[in-house]
Amino acid sequence: MVDLARAKNLERWLERKFPGQTHTKLGVTTLCIDGFPRSANSLLCRKVLATSAYTRPELAHNIHWRQNMECALMAGIPVILAARAPLDAISSYLVYNNGKNADDMFRRYKEILVFAVAHPHNVAIALFDETVENYAAVVDRVNRVHGGILPPPSADDETLNEMLAKEAHEESLHGSNVTRKIGVPSPDRLELKQKYRSFVESHNRFAECSVMYERILKVASRQ
């Protein structure tokens, strides 16, 4: 599975496409957390950082392209996929980016999940609801796949979520529009998201994405 030459080529590709961003970097990255946008990627990263010895420079995250996970896998770096049902993930992302590039979202969603399904023994699955409400379950699955790399959380999810929501607000990582863009649960986004849900459900590629998510659920249940 490890192929350092291919990993180096992918690293160069990532640097060209995402200069200065948090993509996989050989010799620096020790854990890759990624997935389709709005799948609790940021919250998962924050929980890992808050409950483990990992540091921010060590995490490759939030690139939202298959190649970031593939580069890590080829370099022998543990990978965690943040996964969410397509109706919720895609409609939430359309809120995030004001409806831009809507058709391309389905292709990207499917491509990311296809990669994870193809590597069930090397990509640990972190389901959205678990990341939000049962992070301990994510830790257990990650440790079964990757050999005990995460300690069990010492705080419950309500406590962690409140602490990390405050941290996210203070850092303003996504600019001024916190309602749309903050990487923690936010009921204020629900009204905005409703207008995109019917579009997602009626799209001709929605069924393909739904099939892939069902496969992800099966992978997660076996890990």
Image (cartoon, rainbow, N blue to C red):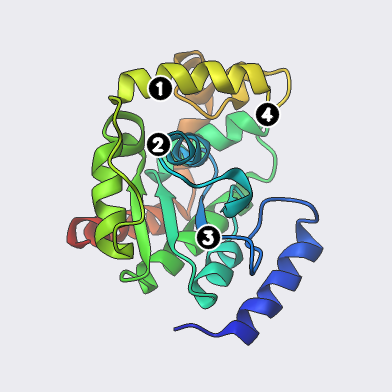
Q: Which residue is mark 4?
A: 173
Number of other residues with Cα within 10 Å of mark 2, as a class: few under 14, some 14 to 19, many 20 or more: some
Residue found 44% across the figure and 84% down from its top: 1
Given the image, on which type of amino acid does mark 1 rest?
A: Asn
Q: For the residue marked with disc 2, what is the amino acid? A: Thr
Q: Nearer the viewer, mark 1 or mark 3?
A: 3
- Neighbor class of circle 4 (other Cα within 10 Å; few <14, some 14-19, many 20+) is few
Q: Earlier in the sequence, mark 3 or mark 2?
A: 3
Q: Label 4 to label 1, Cα distance in Å?
A: 16 Å
Of 170 and 208, nearer the camera is: 170
The reply to whether callout 3 and callout 4 are in contact (CB within 8 Å) is no
* Residue matched to label 2: 51
Q: CA distance from mark 3 to mark 2?
A: 16 Å
Residue 122 pos. (x, y %): 37, 69
Instruction: Note whether 143 is above or below 37 in the view shown.
Output: below
Q: CA distance from mark 2 to mark 4?
A: 20 Å
What secondary structure is found at the residue carrying circle 1? helix
Three-letter code, disc 3 = Thr
Residue 30 is labelled as: 3
Marker disc for residue 161: 1
